[in-house]
Image (spheres, rainbow, N blue to C red):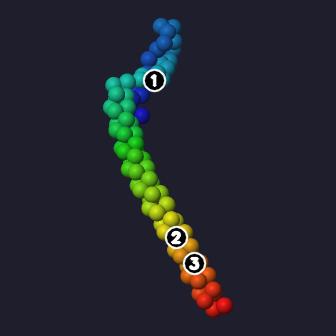
Amino acid sequence: PYMVDTFRAKLNSEDDEETDILRFDGSALTYILINAVKELDAKIDEIRTLHEENKELAARLAELESLVKSLVAEKRNVVNKSMAELR
């Protein structure tokens, strides 16, 4: 809105009435683009942080899954040993 201005002028010398004309002022565009790049840079930083956190959580999950598998195997061994002793 602040980059576009309206003014009235006769387009031809023979015109009886003035015409609404839009004028574009691109001087603010530089600042708009700079701020857009800053916003994108902040989002990229946030995505990088989330990606690192995701990698850490995936590693922790893999470790927990490994521990669960070993506990299940250990439980099976204990149950099998107990069953063998009962026979």
Q: Is residue 83 above or below residue 66?
A: below
Disc 1: which residue: 22
User: If you read the primary sequence from the N terminus, does the residue marked by circle 2 or circle 3 appear first?
Assistant: 2
The quadrant the N terminus occupies is: top left
Decide if residue 38 is on the left or right side of residue 78: left
| Tag 1 near tag 2, CB within 8 Å | no
The picture quadrant where one finds residue 36 is: top left
Q: Position of residue 20 (x, y in %)?
A: 48, 23
Query: Is residue 52 visible in the rendered structure shown here?
Result: yes
Structural crowding at the residue carrying mark 2, measured as other residues with C-alpha within 10 Å and reported as few (<14), some (14–19) or many (≥20): few
Q: Which mark is residue 77?
A: 3
Nearest to the observer: residue 66 or residue 56: 66
Residue at image x 33%, y 25%?
A: 27
Structural crowding at the residue carrying mark 1, measured as other residues with C-alpha within 10 Å and reported as few (<14), some (14–19) or many (≥20): few
Q: What is the secondary structure assignment of the residue under circle 2?
A: helix
- CA gap, disc 1 and disc 3: 83 Å
Q: What is the secondary structure assignment of the residue under circle 3?
A: helix
Q: Position of residue 12 (x, y in %)?
A: 49, 9
User: If you read the primary sequence from the N terminus, does the residue marked by circle 1 or circle 3 appear first?
Assistant: 1
Circle 3: residue type: Asn
Q: Which mark is residue 70?
A: 2
